[in-house]
Image (cartoon, rainbow, N blue to C red):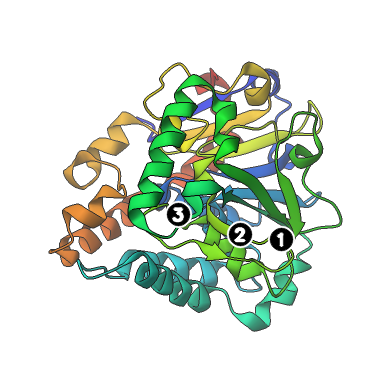
């Protein structure tokens, strides 16, 4: 029984069914803001990196928010696999306590980022021939920008209520800011209807953008006044773009690869309770989504995917959390090879379903 499930938007589904799909059609690899759930993607990512399957015929956009941005920043390094492994080890093994504050958690993030992203390697990352990094952040507005937890909570509560009425109301409380590498912003930033701004990555703002993209409201302090961008407090990109919410492909024959932890796609962080709020068919038309099967999830510790709540559940038992997460990484290791086998053997044609 396969450990993976595969769904595809209309353009990719047609290509797979008629046998014309290949990995060279992938123009974008998207990484969602998933918190510790990204550990499920670790084997998939490393298989793709090790074999150099992406970016063979053209540079591929690596677009991510939060955990997705952290993953892909490692891809751009000169020794990408080693960098990715340092991220993986550091993320799993970093310990937290009840004494931690949003500022102290941010400092731990800073140490982790400094460990897996070396300053001397940033020029290479910014001139990478295979990969173009784009980091999605949220520039907080009004009460959501405050550091004081009480005030920030009021701002987020208001944001939640306004978001119930319309997803567009999120922009009253946060501005989408995409930090990008390359001669021009990624396609989705230039498409009609895009709301937000974009800033070119450089050696000064690279790490700050990565750090800001994972700065979860209330839990992690925001990153202030990132170089090259408007002054303000920058927070987790998932606040606006939680999972997949944009059409990233510029052409119908381009594929957007998306390794996800579940079947459901949620546009924004505050949309989790809104089952009817999903991306439209056009947004999904070029997407190839790969995610673990129910049988795979059954094998995980406690039969559950790692989640942010684990930090609190095991706050007094860090060893158990670390052991559980290491086991998840171990079990997820073959998922990339399994996907590649499905593509190379043609079995993907019989198992793909419409997204």
Marks 2 and 1: in contact by CB < 8 Å? yes
Kindly give the residue lying farthest to the left in the view shown.
316
Q: Residue at x 75, y 57 (%)?
A: 199
Which labelled disc corresponds to residue 229?
1
- Which residue is the site of mark 3? 42
For label 3, the crowd category at 10 Å Cα-Cα, with few meaning under 14, some 14 to 19 and many 20 or more, is: many
For label 1, the crowd category at 10 Å Cα-Cα, with few meaning under 14, some 14 to 19 and many 20 or more, is: some
Quarter occupied by residue 294: top left
Q: Residue at x 66, y 83 (%)?
A: 120
Q: Is residue 190 visible?
A: yes
For label 2, the crowd category at 10 Å Cα-Cα, with few meaning under 14, some 14 to 19 and many 20 or more, is: some
From the viewer's perspective, tell me whether residue 256 is left or right of residue 220: right
**Front one among 26 and 239:** 239
In the image, residue 129 lies at what x, y percent? 79, 62
Q: Secondary structure at mark 3?
A: helix
Q: Residue at x 49, y 20 (%)?
A: 165
The image quadrant where one finds the C terminus is top right
Quarter occupied by residue 200: bottom right
Q: Secondary structure at mark 1?
A: loop
Which labelled disc corresponds to residue 232?
2
Q: CA distance from mark 1 to mark 2?
A: 9 Å
Kindly give the residue lying farthest to the right in the view shown.
183
Q: Earlier in the sequence, mark 2 or mark 3?
A: 3
The image quadrant where one finds the N terminus is top left
**Front one among 334 and 307:** 307
Comparing marks 3 and 1, which lies closer to the viewer? Answer: 1
Q: CA distance from mark 3 to mark 1?
A: 31 Å
Marks 1 and 3: in contact by CB < 8 Å? no
Q: Residue at x 45, y 48 (%)?
A: 41
């Amino acid at each position: 029984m396969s450990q993976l499930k595969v769904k595809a938007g209309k353009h990719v589904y047609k290509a797979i069914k008629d046998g014309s799909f290949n990995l060279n059609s992938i123009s974008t690899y998207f990484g969602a803001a998933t918190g510790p759930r990204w550990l499920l993607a670790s084997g998939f990512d490393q298989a793709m990196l090790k074999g150099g399957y992406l970016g063979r015929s053209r540079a591929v956009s690596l677009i991510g928010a939060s955990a997705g941005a952290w993953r892909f920043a490692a891809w751009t390094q000169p020794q990408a696999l080693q960098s990715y492994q340092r991220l993986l080890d550091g993320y799993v093994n970093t310990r937290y306590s009840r004494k931690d504050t949003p500022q102290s958690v941010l400092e731990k993030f800073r140490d982790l980022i400094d460990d897996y992203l070396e300053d001397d390697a940033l020029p290479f990352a910014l001139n990478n021939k295979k990969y173009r990094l784009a980091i999605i952040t949220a520039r907080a507005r009004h009460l959501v920008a405050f550091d004081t937890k009480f005030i920030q909570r009021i701002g987020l509560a208001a944001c939640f209520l306004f978001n119930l009425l319309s997803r567009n109301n999120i922009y009253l409380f946060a501005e989408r800011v995409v930090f990008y590498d390359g001669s021009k912003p990624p396609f989705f930033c230039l498409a009609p209807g895009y709301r937000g701004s974009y800033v070119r990555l450089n050696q000064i703002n690279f790490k700050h953008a990565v750090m800001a993209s994972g700065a979860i409201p209330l839990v992690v302090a925001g990153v202030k006044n990132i170089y090259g961008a408007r002054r303000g407090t920058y927070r987790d990109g998932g606040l606006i773009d939680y999972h997949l919410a944009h059409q990233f492909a510029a052409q119908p024959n381009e594929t957007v690869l998306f390794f996800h932890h579940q079947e459901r796609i949620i546009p924004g962080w505050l949309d989790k309770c809104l089952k009817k709020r999903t991306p439209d068919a056009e947004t999904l038309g070029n997407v190839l989504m790969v995610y673990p099967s129910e049988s795979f999830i059954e094998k995980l510790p406690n039969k559950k995917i790692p989640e942010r709540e684990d930090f609190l559940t095991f706050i007094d038992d860090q060893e158990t959390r670390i052991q559980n997460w290491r086991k998840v990484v171990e079990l997820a290791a073959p998922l990339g090879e399994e996907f590649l086998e499905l593509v190379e053997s043609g079995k993907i044609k019989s198992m793909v379903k419409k997204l």
